[in-house]
Image (cartoon, rainbow, N blue to C red):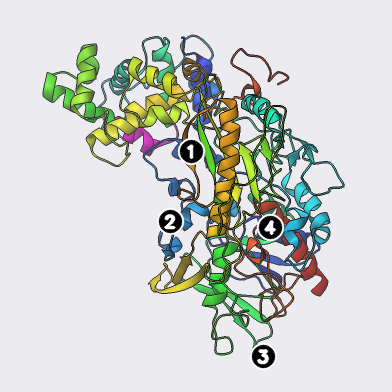
Amino acid sequence: MTDRTPTERADVCVVGAGPAGALAAHRLAGEGYDVVVLEAGERFAFEDRERRMERAIRPGHGPLSVWEMGGPRDAYTSAGQRFYPLNRTRVKGVGGTTLHWQGMVMRLHESDFESWPIEYADLRPYYAEAESALGVAGADDNPYAPPREEPFPMPGFEPSYSDSLFAEACERLGVTMHSVPNARNSEGYDDRSACVGYGTCQPVCPSGAKYSADHHVAKAESEGARIVDRAPVQRLDHDEAGERVTAAVYATPDGRTHRQEAREFVLAAGGVETPRLLLLSESERYPDGLANSSGAVGRYFMEHLFAGAGGTLDRETRQNHVGFMTSECHQFYEDPTRGTEGTAGGIPAWSGDDGEPTPDSVKLEFLNYAGPSPVEMALSGEEWGDDLLKTLRKGYGNSIAMGGLAGQRPRKENRIELDPSTTDDHGNPVPEVHWRVDARTKASLRRANEIQRAVLDELGVDVAWTVGPEETGPAYHHMGTTRMGTDPDESVVNPRLRTHDLRNLSVASSSVFVTSGAMNPTLTIAALALKAADHVDERL
Amino acid sequence: MELSRRDALAALAASGAAVGAGAVLGTDADLVEPPRAGGRDREDETDSLTDERLATLLAVAEVVYPAEVSGVEGFVRTYALGRTADRPEYREGMADALATLDEYARTWHDADYRDLAPETRESVLDQMTVDSADPDPAGSDPERVRYYAVNELLFALYSSPTGGELVGIENPQGHPGGTASYRRGPDGEGGSGE
């Protein structure tokens, strides 16, 4: 029977076994500390991944079933202006949300750090370490990327056939395409195979070629760390003075509750459960929740929003062979309002109306999986035999699309609170998400659509759909809810990722982001986790 | 287009069947050692997926697979047996769904599904509303038949290289066909080197 009792004399207790917790635990265990990781979800067997893939492809299984999400443990309330599908956005388990992520790993740009208390230069060495840890396949062909000193650990994936179609139109418009850094093996790396092209990256990579944090959990264990799964932390206790966390109180499947004591605590439970745990840890000393003297815990919740457009072309586009992207455009990241000039025309400058906010950064993507995949069409159709084949041939082959991300500025009213009227399987109030999409974000999405539409028109695409300000949805990136800062009245953690209020409590998560940028956040999460671990090491 | 042993193997591998190729496929023309339980009924605890039930599954395949594929029998037997070899609950679910289909066929046409004429087989699926049923392994009769018979077969076919090629994609979703094909154009140019 699995031993889920506390570790005696632990140096470090990490809450959460996703990428931040796994990397921090690995680094600290490697330094010789006794590390215990408490993970709410289970440890999934690698051998089951093909079957999880089948669940993802075949109708008859809800999307949450792929990684066993959505039970009473995961209850939540969406109370904002816009519904937030929280459980679609996360995985609880050893490996965390990297089990279902897309695996795109860009560094934030230098400009993204303008209102952060650290600079790109501070994070730069950690970015390099994070790229090495995750195993990033990339190429040095992006003129808009921030400076880097080392090549990527693996060669980038070559552009797709559909990228070559886009390239002609983009050249005519003066739009620059470049490669995508992928946390996905383009060759064998770190005892994981090269990508074999299952085409189901999101939500499951059966081969393990896409990085998932269970690999660093295993590495941490080999360095002596202990992982306790199915051990959701209920609250953190502190000492009388309110200066130090003394224990993480966690539940186990046998109905018992345990106290894990440690010298240092690292919260790595993502941008929703991290603030929730702090709020659940209210005490007489801290009636508004732990580490919350600023009132910022749970506040400034940010997401990235999707913008896209697509349709069909009069040529074959060869989609859905792989489940990842090979080309992007960061040309409109620093100045989304700019126009371009190419060999035959260009992208017009921003068309904003009076009173419309100026757009923020947008990141543009060229999809390799536009339109339905034949197998998914076959399984959800109402025909079979020759009729079905005819429909599949008609439906597959000519789809093409672009995507993109826009960020949100931090707004206090976008927040994670506790909902006392609804409780989880341990009687704790569930997270309540208050979220809306503001006018500036809508302007950014509209700008992304303008550029996408211009490229698709130039290519001759019969545009069939557009996802813009009205249809947009979240990209499943939770940021900002325990923001970093130098002022304890305005922020939750300091630039060393330690909470202002408690001397031995750190946060390793996108929850410390001050702004969202418009880049996928996980590489920055990984870099910050390594930085947080170094600071824990300094204190121990 | 011929469904090959490679297709069955590929479909099995992609579905996570824990049986090795040798265990299921043997080494020669006789691809599969069928269950030796001819005549046993589905209550038999040792093997519910009898020859008769497999014949019913094959009869469904003849309806739901396009006419231009051949080699269906070997493909389906290999796939169905390999896939369920270490999944007794799944095997039971499949056998139950096929038994249900036979019961409907007997009720309406006095014969098991596998013994019906091809056009009658198609009409039974229509009458059962399997075509519009939402696949559900724990659902109603048509929903289970859709899940365990129709979609089982369609998943096997259209996630295999041969099934994919029928539609124009040699590396369909669910098949680990490598990272060369996404770079190839429709005429086969590009994407070499792997």
> Quick one: A39 or B18, which is closer to the camera?
A39
**Residue occupied by mark 1:** A51
> Quick one: B36 or A60, which is closer to the camera?
A60
Give the structural element (helix, strand or loop) at label 3.
Answer: loop
Mark 2 residue type? Gly
Q: Earlier in the sequence, mark 3 or mark 4?
A: 3
A60 relative to A106 in the view: left or right: left
Q: Quadrant of residue A123?
A: bottom right
Mark 3 residue type? Ala
Chain bearing mark 3: A
- When the figure is inspected, residue B18 is found, relative to residue A106, above or below; the finding is above
A240 relative to A84 in the view: left or right: right
Q: Earlier in the sequence, mark 1 or mark 4?
A: 1
Q: Nearer the viewer, mark 3 or mark 4?
A: 4
Give the structural element (helix, strand or loop) at label 2.
Answer: loop
Instruction: Pinpoint residue A327: horizontal percent, then vertical percent.
Output: 67, 35
Region in magenta: B85-96
Mark 4 residue type? Ile
Q: Nearer the viewer, mark 1 or mark 4?
A: 4
Chain bearing mark 2: A
Q: Earlier in the sequence, mark 2 or mark 4?
A: 2
Which residue is depicted at the point 47% across and 45% down?
A66
Which residue is depicted at the point 80% across and 74% down?
A539
Q: Nearer the viewer, mark 1 or mark 3?
A: 3
Instruction: Pinpoint residue A322: horizontal percent, then vertical percent.
Output: 59, 31
**Residue occupied by mark 2:** A70
Label 3 environment density (alpha carbons within 10 Å; few <14, some 14–19, many ≥20): few
Which residue is depicted at the point 46% across and 9% down?
B1
Which residue is depicted at the point 32% across and 39% down?
B136
